[in-house]
Image (cartoon, rainbow, N blue to C red):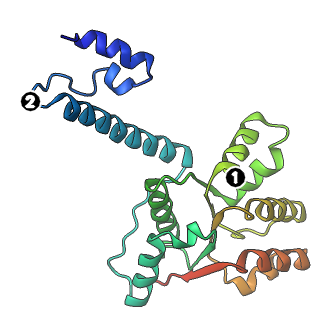
Amino acid sequence: MADITEIRELAKKLNLWNIARGYIDLNDEKLSNLDYLQMILQKELEIRARQKQIKLRRASKLPNKVFDASNLNKGLEWQIKQLSHLTWLNEEQNVILLGKCGTGKTSLAVHLGETAIDNGHKTYYASIDVFIYIVENKDINPKAGATFSYMRECDLIIIDDVFYLEPTRSELQAFYRAVTFLNETRSIIFITNREISTWLDVVEDKHLCQTLLDRITANCQIIRLTDR
């Protein structure tokens, strides 16, 4: 009869760490050999899936916010329900979450990010100032470079506080280049409290900003959140 210690040693060699470390009970003698093996492998997969979600959630840098949908009007509730199906993500569409401060834009973005992670999609969140810092320093700062490399692996990027403050010309150029590059093969959620029509008012290079707007809204859903 096989010894549990020997089984765990074999599991270690196969990188089945949840079995090797005793996280899965090997003492159930009520099951047939095939059922028992299936049970062990199924539990291994379940634990690995949970561990992957935890790892993706940690790497995403999503803030700890809970979206409260209880006070939404029916139209907005329907829109958000459709977004939660992630069809837009699979089709690499962008989303702009628009509304005043306190309307739940960031918490909704976090909800969508967590839904994406639950479905196996790598996600990354950053405020616009952090995003621009990463982009401007990726070639000279190892940490910024590693973060940008991770963003390139993501299916979803969330950028908060877009044009909350007026960007400099160099910041706008860096933002434009990065968004244009990243937007080719993934979805981006832009969170802003400025009406899109006023974006041109807060930048010096209006032509570049208009080009940016044309790019990100070409395949995009715009969700306007109102005061509750």
Q: Residue at x 32, y 16 (%)?
A: 8
Point 49% across, 59% down: residue: 116
Residue 190 percent across, percent down from the top left:
64, 69
Q: Position of residue 46 (x, y in %)?
A: 33, 41
Identify the residue at horizontal 76%, vertical 50% (top origin).
Answer: 133
Q: Which mark is residue 208?
A: none
- Using the image, tell me which numbered label, if any, was put on residue 130: 1
Q: Is residue 142 above or below residue 86?
A: above
Taking depth in this image into account, of 88 and 13 the one nearest to the observer is: 13
Q: CA distance from mark 2 to mark 1?
A: 55 Å
Q: Is residue 188 left or right of residue 184?
A: left
Q: Which of 95/18 is in front?
A: 18
Q: Quadrant of the C terminus?
A: bottom left
Kind of residue at disc 2 = Lys
Residue type indicated by callout 1: Val
Residue 34: image quadrant is top left
Label placed on residue 30: 2
Q: Residue at position x 33%, y 20% from top?
A: 21
Can residue 39 be seen in this snapshot?
yes
